[in-house]
């Protein structure tokens, strides 16, 4: 029995409405095969007014102090030799907020926070993003062509996303195996690249139903391509996959579609409700597939 605000269960999933630190603390040790998620990017966005919301941190130090509690519990709950994958990005420093223009090394902070509680950095994958799209969306000075012509000393490259993968020490009792039929060499050659060039940035779950006028304009689910690749590479069918920041259920929908079991935690009520609907639908589709296959 998990203590939480609300919960929803299906044939292949369990979704909990509550604080991820508190919920993950209640999971048995060495019970998770894999986890994948996109955490709050420090205090860049405030998702809710809850004190348990890591996005409510006053600064990076407070965020990482809060985040470290989750990482320690996640390490305890993960099986030896298994992995966790974190979607992250560096952040732009802004003159009005930070006193200077530059880049904040958020990904470096995430790596150090994991290593402090025992995780080992296993892989760092760069996810290519269009600098034209970034320039159009953010109007970043360093990406403007007119700035290049004026003084390229302030020009910079676009900012990619990263998938940071960490391993819990120990021997994996249930090896993750593939065959040439379901994982051909050509696919491995592409996915083994340190830069994923072919992630479709627009292939995400529909977010419209979870939006709220005052604070949801920034809702941006993790791309399904990234989740599917990570699940295929680092989990087996039937494995239990966790997302402590489940959002609208992207990681859960992909887990169910690929034959994994899913445990999700979401603090924000509107996200939890939309994730419940998405996972219910994904669970029904999985049952239909299993019945007809």
Image: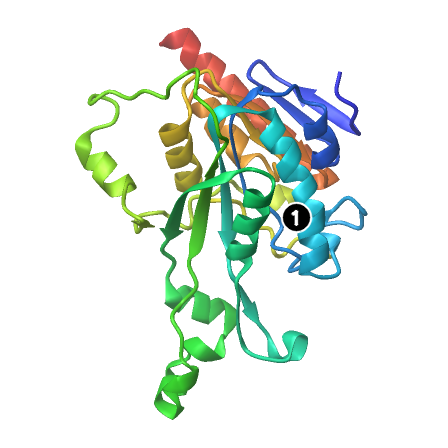
Q: Nearer the viewer, residue 260 or 118?
A: 118
| Residue 104 in sight here | yes
Taking the image as shown, residue 22 lies to the left or right of residue 278, namely right
Rendered image quadrant of residue 290: top left
Quarter of the picture holding the C terminus: top left
Vertical comparison of 6 with 55: above or below: above
Q: Residue at x 35, y 89 (%)?
A: 149
Vertical comparison of 92 with 85: above or below: below
Rate crowding at label 1 as few (under 14), some (14 to 19) or many (20 or more) other CA atoms within 10 Å: some
Q: Nearer the viewer, residue 292 or 64?
A: 64
Q: How is the image coloured?
A: rainbow
Taking the image as shown, residue 151 lies to the left or right of residue 120, namely left
Q: Position of residue 65 (x, y in %)?
A: 70, 49
Q: Residue at x 47, y 18 (%)?
A: 286
Q: Position of residue 259 (x, y in %)?
A: 44, 19
Q: Residue at x 55, y 78 (%)?
A: 101
Q: Secondary structure at mark 1?
A: loop
Vertical comparison of 22 with 40: above or below: above
Taking the image as shown, residue 148 lies to the left or right of residue 188, namely right
Quarter of the picture holding the N terminus: top right
Residue furthest out toward the bottom: 150
According to the picture, the residue beneath numbered tag 1 turns out to be 211
Residue furthest out toward the top: 291
């Amino acid at each position: 029995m998990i203590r939480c605000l609300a919960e929803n269960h299906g044939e292949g999933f369990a979704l909990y409405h509550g604080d991820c630190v508190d919920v993950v603390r209640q999971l048995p040790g060495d019970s998770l095969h894999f986890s994948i998620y996109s955490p709050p990017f420090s205090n860049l966005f405030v998702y809710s007014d809850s004190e348990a919301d890591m996005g409510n941190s006053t600064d990076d130090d407070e965020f990482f102090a809060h985040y470290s509690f989750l990482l320690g519990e996640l390490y305890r709950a993960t099986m030896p030799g298994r992995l966790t994958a974190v979607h992250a990005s560096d952040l732009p420093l802004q003159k009005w907020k930070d006193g200077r223009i530059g880049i904040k090394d958020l990904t470096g902070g995430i790596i150090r926070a994991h290593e402090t509680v025992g995780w080992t950095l296993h892989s760092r994958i760069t996810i290519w993003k269009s600098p034209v799209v970034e320039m159009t969306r953010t109007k970043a000075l360093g990406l403007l062509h007119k700035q290049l012509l004026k003084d390229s000393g302030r020009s910079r490259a676009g900012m990619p996303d990263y998938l940071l993968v960490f391993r819990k020490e120990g021997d994996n009792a249930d090896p993750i195996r593939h065959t040439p039929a379901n994982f051909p060499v050509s696919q491995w050659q592409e996915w083994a690249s340190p830069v994923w060039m072919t992630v479709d940035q627009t292939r995400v779950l529909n977010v419209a139903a979870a939006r709220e006028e005052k604070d949801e304009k920034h809702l941006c689910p993790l791309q399904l391509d990234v989740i599917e690749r990570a699940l295929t590479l680092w989990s087996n069918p039937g494995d239990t996959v966790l997302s402590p920041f489940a959002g609208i259920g992207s990681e859960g929908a992909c887990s169910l579609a690929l034959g994994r079991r899913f445990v999700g935690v979401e603090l924000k009520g509107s996200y939890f409700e939309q994730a419940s609907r998405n996972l219910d639908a994904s669970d029904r589709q999985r049952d239909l597939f299993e019945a007809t296959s």
